[in-house]
Amino acid sequence: MSNGDITFHTRKWVRPEDLNANGTLFGGSLLRWIDEEAAIYAIVQLGNGLAVTKYMSEINFVSSAVQGDLIEMGLTATHFGRTSLTMRAEVRNMFTRESILTIEKIVFVNLGADGKPAPHGYDTITYDRDRVPTKHLEQFHPQD
């Protein structure tokens, strides 16, 4: 059952290279996609390209997908800490509308230039691009 607060924006097409030995979607591929989407979501919400995965709660695989299925991933912020962002994730099959996976808690930590947790100053979700960092590469590759 989908949480009404989640908006589904990202879609993936299940391709042959995404399958396990049983011919269904490999959980590792799905988790890689979720972690990438969660990182992008955290970067947008925190306005910082230096955000890292800290924690994922129990991963609940509810159903699967097969080659050719279209899946959609949704994330929503559930809590803003001083240096962290907690979110919930759900993945569902676009054809059947069945939930494939839920993760109740994914925590990202906002890092400063020194690589240590740093306050981000936000406490609300943004749906605009107002927080997208503009100098991500310079953070990792400072100019001399």
Image (cartoon, rainbow, N blue to C red):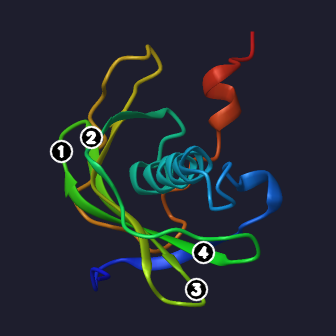
Horizontal relation, residue 87 to residue 33: left or right? left
Q: Quadrant of residue 119?
A: top left
Residue at 31% from the left image edge and 24% from the top image edge: 117
Chain-order first, disc 2 or disc 4: 4
User: Which residue position is annotated with label 2?
Assistant: 84
Secondary element type, mark 3: loop
The quadrant of the image that shows the N terminus is bottom left
Labelled pair 2, 3 in contact (Cβ < 8 Å): no
Labelled pair 2, 1 in contact (Cβ < 8 Å): yes
State the mark number for residue 71: 4
Q: 10 Å neighbourhood of mark 3: few (<14), some, or many (≥20)?
A: some
- The amino acid sitting under disc 2 is Ser
Residue at 39% from the left image edge and 27% from the top image edge: 111
The quadrant of the image that shows the C terminus is top right
Labelled pair 1, 3 in contact (Cβ < 8 Å): no
- The amino acid sitting under disc 1 is Gly
